[in-house]
């Protein structure tokens, strides 16, 4: 099988952010992005999250070239948008290895390591302490 034939095959990748996980399928198409059975605008509702999701396509100048079908689970809306962005970037890199350098330069292939800090006993939250009382 030569490279031209393999490029017609859908590519799968996984993206993660906070507690969200996105399974992304990328195939040549007209530029539609479907998330959990809805369009991006319907699913996220906020324009900034739509911009975050489309970042890898804008960086690689391939906005209208691929159809993306994604299944996103866990976390909140911002985490899900970040996970989807990470998954799309990974899928684009797998589809065409030459796209790695622009995606890497834009920081889209690096998983965001920031997580919620764990709760500690004796405190109200991770760092918030109860009010001090002298008497």
Image: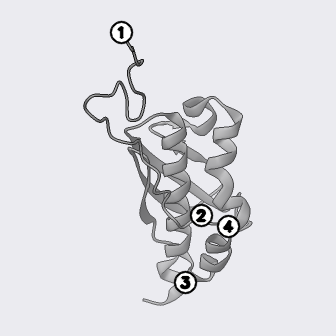
Q: Residues within 10 Å of mark 1 (few under 14, many from 20)?
A: few
Instruction: Measure the alpha-carbon separation of dots 1 and 2.
Output: 53 Å
Q: Would you say the residues marked 4 and 3 are in contact, meaning their CB atoms lie under 8 Å apart?
A: no
Instruction: Measure the alpha-carbon separation of dots 4 and 1.
Output: 55 Å
Specify whether 32 is left or right of 126: right
Q: Would you say the residues marked 4 and 2 are in contact, meaning their CB atoms lie under 8 Å apart?
A: yes
Q: Point out which mark residue 108 bears.
A: 2
Q: Residues within 10 Å of mark 3 (few under 14, many from 20)?
A: few
Q: How is the image coloured?
A: one colour
Specify whether 15 is left or right of 41: left
Q: Residues within 10 Å of mark 4 (few under 14, many from 20)?
A: some
Q: Please, is residue 4 above or below residue 14 in the view? A: below
For the residue pair 13 and 108, the one nearer the viewer reads as: 108
First in sequence, mark 3 or 2: give its number.
3
For the residue pair 121 and 40, the one nearer the viewer reads as: 121
User: Which residue occupies 48% across, 42% down?
Assistant: 80
Query: Residue tagged by mark 4?
Result: 106
Relative image position of residue 32 (x, y in whole percent) = 61, 48
Q: Nearer the viewer, mark 4 or mark 3?
A: 4
First in sequence, mark 4 or 3: give its number.
3
User: Which residue occupies 66% across, 41% down?
Assistant: 50
First in sequence, mark 4 or 1: give its number.
4
Q: Nearer the viewer, mark 4 or mark 1?
A: 1
Query: Residue tagged by mark 1?
Result: 135
Give the quadrant of the N terminus: bottom left
Q: Nearer the viewer, mark 1 or mark 2?
A: 1
User: At numbered mark 1, what does the secondary structure look like: helix, strand or loop?
Assistant: loop
Instruction: Measure the alpha-carbon separation of dots 3 and 2.
Output: 26 Å
User: At numbered mark 3, what does the secondary structure look like: helix, strand or loop?
Assistant: helix
């Amino acid at each position: 099988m030569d490279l031209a034939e393999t490029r017609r095959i859908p590519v799968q990748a996984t993206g993660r952010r906070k507690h969200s996980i996105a399974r992304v399928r990328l195939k040549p198409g007209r530029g539609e992005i479907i998330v959990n059975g809805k369009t991006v605008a319907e699913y996220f509702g906020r324009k900034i999250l739509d911009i975050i999701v489309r970042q890898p396509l804008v960086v690689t100048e391939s906005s209208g070239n691929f159809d993306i079908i994604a299944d996103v689970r866990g976390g909140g809306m911002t985490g899900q948008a970040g996970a989807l962005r990470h998954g799309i970037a990974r899928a684009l890199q797998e589809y065409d290895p030459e796209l790695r350098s622009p995606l890497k330069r834009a920081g889209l292939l690096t998983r965001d390591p920031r997580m919620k800090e764990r709760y500690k006993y004796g405190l109200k939250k991770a760092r918030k302490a109860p009010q001090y009382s002298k008497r």
